[in-house]
Amino acid sequence: MPDGRTGPGSLQADQVQPFLIESSRIRGRLLRLEDVCDRILSRHDYPAPVARLLAEMLALCGGLASLIKYDGIFTLQASGDGALRMMVVDVTSEGEMRGYAGFDEDRLEGLISESGGSRPTVPQLFGKGHLAFTVDQGSHSRRYQGIVALDGDTLAACLQHYFMQSEQLQSGIVLAAGQRGAHWVSAALVLQRLPEEAVHAIEDEDDWRRAMVLQASCSEDELLDDSLAFHDLLYRLFHEEGVRVFEPRPLRDGCRCSRQKLENVLRTLPRMEIEDLKNDGAVEVTCEFCTALYRFDDDDLERIYAG
């Protein structure tokens, strides 16, 4: 795996750039989602506050997933009783991402109207709810899940509180999302310090506070600027501390839905219930993530239930 000090580099859209602040051993992740973010959001006609938050969650999920080792699926899901009922993003260990948001259109319009043009907070959108992240490595490994209340104004604030209270992991998260013309882009800068890396408490706290100050100096415009290479941005932020970069990890848009998976689901339902779901002589199922339409006619159903 090649590594080296940052310097002039190429642009790295739709990739996660791992790095290490050498003076303090604080690890970090920097990513910018362009094609991935726009393709996922363009499949649905989301209102701007929902689209922006989903774009941020895509960047957040990609950054957090890259901080752990797993062979399966990392999922980040928020749900509540507000106008925004549910938002879910997942990324496989191979780097395939997908995302979806479900909302009450009338309640959301009322919330947007009441906000007077200001950006709604996470609690305002979700109401009373929680944020959960799950690592699923299949039936041969224990499923891990962490849950935190949606008390912070932003997704970053909610996760930072969880890591500090539940995992004793100091974490700093900066998210950005916006439109470049008609296309959505998002980005994340994540710093994290593991408990076992804290050896000299006073010096470590000084190092951490300095890292937080430097991270906070990174603007949304810089994170989303496609003319600013990752290496150049990291060099600007952390060059006095010494920053080392590692092999980037690509991310891509990809849904795991398939006709075979839907057939397996249909097979678990009573045939009479399936008959009630018919429309124009067939059962139609649309994937909420990628909007792919699957149609099962009488011949398909006979084959499914015969099996």
Image (spheres, helix red, strand yellow):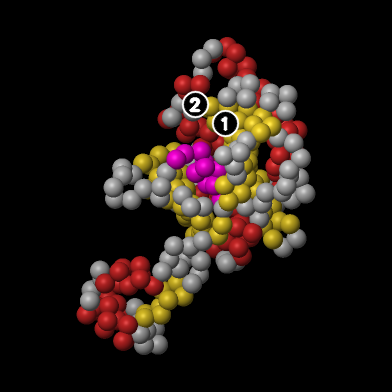
Whether pointer 2 and pointer 1 mark residues with C-beta atoms closer than 8 Å, the reply is: yes
Label 2 neighbour load within 10 Å: few <14, some 14-19, many 20+: some
In the depicted structure, whether residue 290 falls above or below residue 24: below
Q: Residue at x 69, y 61 (%)?
A: 183
Q: Residue at x 57, y 67 (%)?
A: 43
For the stretch drawn in magenta, the main secondary structure is helix
Q: Amino acid at mark 2?
A: Leu
Q: Where's residue 185, x and y in %?
A: 67, 54
Q: Mark 2: which secondary structure?
A: loop
Quadrant housing the C terminus: bottom left
In the depicted structure, whether residue 260 falls above or below residue 136: below
Read off the residue under disc 2.
194
Q: Where's residue 168, x and y in %?
A: 46, 26
Label 1 neighbour load within 10 Å: few <14, some 14-19, many 20+: many
Residue 101 visible, this angle: no
Read off the residue under disc 1.
27
- Residue 239, by quadrant, is top right
Residue 286 counted in the magenta span: no
